[in-house]
Image (cartoon, helix red, strand yellow):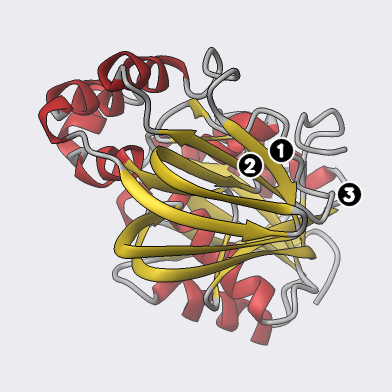
Amino acid sequence: MGGRKAWLILHGKQAQNEEVRAAVMALRERGWQLAVRLTWEGGDAARLVQEGLAAGYSTLIAGGGDGTLREVAEALALAGGQASLALLPLGTANDFCRAAGIPLVPDESLALLERPPQRIDLGEVDGQLFLNMATGGFGSRVTANTSEELKKLLGGAAYFLTGLTRFSEVHSAFGRFRGPDFAWEGDFLALGIGNGRQAGGGHVLCPQALVNDGLLDICIVPAPQDVVGTLGTLLSGGVLGLETVSLSARLAWLEIDAPEGLDINLDGEPLESRHLRFAARAAALSVHLPESSPLLG
């Protein structure tokens, strides 16, 4: 089954989204045969990827927030990554799609189906794959603790407000980092390991990241004396403005030892461990991106 056919895996909460429904109908009117399947609970996205591939679809669409996009991308890559993937951003943050230049209007993002797909990298940690970024330290707790109600009300600003209300919980983490020609250990306030450039609703941690260079961009913000001031800068604009104090590198792999344990957020998926090994899985997936996407080198 080839040609103008696509299998849309849509987050169940978006079933009544009128913009999405209109975009799907418009695509069908342009000659596309579009099958729509909804997620209901954890594991559905991976199962639906398998169903779409088994039905012979060579183009899949992931519709939802960053977590849904990650789940579909991971399942497709683990299945061999031969089908192409289009991204329909419908979340609060949409961090990967914003950095990639993918339109946030459904009919405009679906129009990228007409563009040839590009091979892109994924990040990998302990057997799990991620599309956008792994974050650690205080920023990952802000993302994890921002309520759905607040995100609906304020959008990406909800992460900033949550961060402001949790200043009393700020404390650094200790880690030992090792990669090719890279080593550092110490207390740090925030950590970003990026395939993409931003996380947590627009906080830019890896401003030079590319998705087709076979590398992960690493950003470590050491714990400063002025914790509150540094945290305020991070929450308001990411690592931009902290270039002189942050550590950065571009690595094929990175190992982290955190004796007290480290909380990591993978595109919305929580992970906790004392030892982590990150690696770039080069050219793992074919994705429909804008020709001028900033993430393409």
Front position among marks 2 and 3 = 2
N-terminal-most mark, 1 or 3: 3
Report which quarter residue 90 is drawn in: top left
Query: What residue is shown at x 40% (from left), y 74% (from top)?
Result: 44
* Distance (Cα) linking label 1 and label 2: 6 Å
- On residue 196, the disc is 2
- Report if the CB atoms under discs 1 and 2 are less than 8 Å apart: yes
Report which quarter residue 206 is drawn in: top right
Position of 293 with respect to 187 (left or right) is: right
Eyeballing the image, is 259 above or below 167?
below
Three-letter amino acid code of the residue under disc 2: Gly
Three-letter amino acid code of the residue under disc 3: Pro
Circle 1 is placed at which residue position?
Answer: 209
* Distance (Cα) linking label 2 and label 3: 20 Å
Query: What residue is shown at x 53% (from left), y 22% (from top)?
Result: 245
Q: Mark 1: which secondary structure?
A: loop
Residue 121 seen: yes
